[in-house]
Image (cartoon, rainbow, N blue to C red):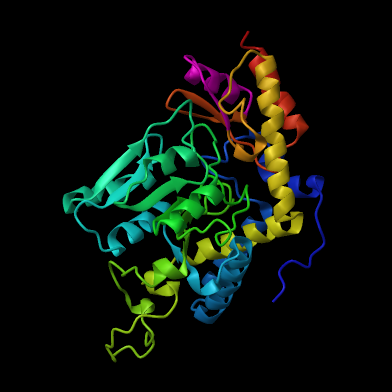
Amino acid sequence: MNFWKTEIMDLKEVREYFPHINKGITYLNHAATGPLSQKVLEVMNEFFLSKSEESIDDYTGFVKITDETKEIIASLLNADIKRIAFGDNTTNGMNLIAQGLKWNKGDEIILNDIEFPANVYPFLNLRKQGVNVIFVKSHDGVVSAEDIIERMTKNTRLVSVSMVQFLSGYRIDLGLLGEICSQNNIYLSVDAIQGLGALNLDVQKNKIDFMSCGTQKWLLALQGLAIYYFSDKLFDTLEPAYVGWLGVKNAWEMLDYKLILKNSAERFQPGTISTVGVFALNAALKLFRDFGFKEVEERVISNSEFLLNELQKLNIKPYLRKLDKRYLSGIVSFKHPEAWSILEILKDRKIEAAVREGTVRISPHFYNNEDDFAKLLCAFRSLN
């Protein structure tokens, strides 16, 4: 099935699908939660109407949409569809790998000191098994692939990183990190929630063993659904920490209790997943497809470059201002002692942003345009 033959949308058309724009809201907070497009709303309304009137138990239709959605994801990630599973959130994805690998006392896991907690606590939980969790020190919002590689030892079993750092927006060099991990038989796990949807990700090229990504941020879908990817190497090693009836081959022979796991990532998908979440993600992915996944990333990076330059003209010093564009993402942020006051000023002007750890975080998506940025910069000029 070819999902890529479509009539390409322009930016004006895309913006018409986001109702908040007509409400005068300038939404620049996609690193927290993405807004739902009209396309997603239409699909969800159809879904709820169907569930209330006629196709109340349409499991076959759900399976069809699930398979189609996984095919789009597999194409986007350059992955085998059999290695894609759905779950409920990013954290539980990390728990799959933390609890599914067999650990030995003295094994090392490398993290860093500015990771989002979802990519920390599942691994800290392994300390009781004698696993050493190493935190690489950051510098001005950055932990580079080189920093992590330098910390590797013969005991390193796993490196887990965010594709994009949630405070600074730093995009790590997964290609370099994946190559070195592969050469040293180290598993590479990636939390992609601050990247996927804004940026493209090739799991084969970057030699990623595991990826976990909730769909509620840059993917512009719902909370309660996440995407998991497993490499062949990890899949052959990882044991499900828990097993449910939909994770076995003979699921529909309900009284034939043979524990034979499916030969796909669905073995890690043991029970019912968020039906409406899958329908919403399907619609959101098709909006990206209709604009062009490559074009989405180009606009996201272009937006960040523009904001980095403009903020410096206002004597604001954002993270990443001195870095090459290959390290940029959709997040532009800066430390400020009056961060919460700034956020209130933005809210008064119906501009949605965020503050995290004393950092003002601006996170525009591909559909944001020069009008949105003019409004934002006008608000920042009023601070002086």
Q: Give the camera-side residue of 188 and 182.
A: 182
Residue beneath the point at 21% across and 48% down: 127
Q: As displayed, is residue 175 above or below residue 113?
A: below
Place residue 138 in its image quadrant.
top left
Residue 260 seen in the figure = yes
Q: Residue at x 60, y 71 (%)?
A: 71
Evaluate whether residue 49 shows in this view.
Answer: no
In which quadrant is the N terminus drawn? Answer: bottom right
Looking at the image, residue 290 sits to the left or right of residue 63; the answer is right
Q: Is residue 370 left or right of residue 105?
A: right
- Residue beneath the point at 79% across and 65% down: 6
Q: Whole-percent x and y of residue 7?
A: 82, 62
Q: Quadrant of the C terminus?
A: top right
Magenta span: 332-350
The answer to if 345 sits in the magenta stretch is: yes
Residue lying at 74% horizontally and 25% vertically, measured from the top left: 374
The image quadrant of residue 261 is bottom left
Where is residue 323? Give x, y as percent. 61, 30
Q: Position of residue 192 (x, y in %)?
A: 50, 50
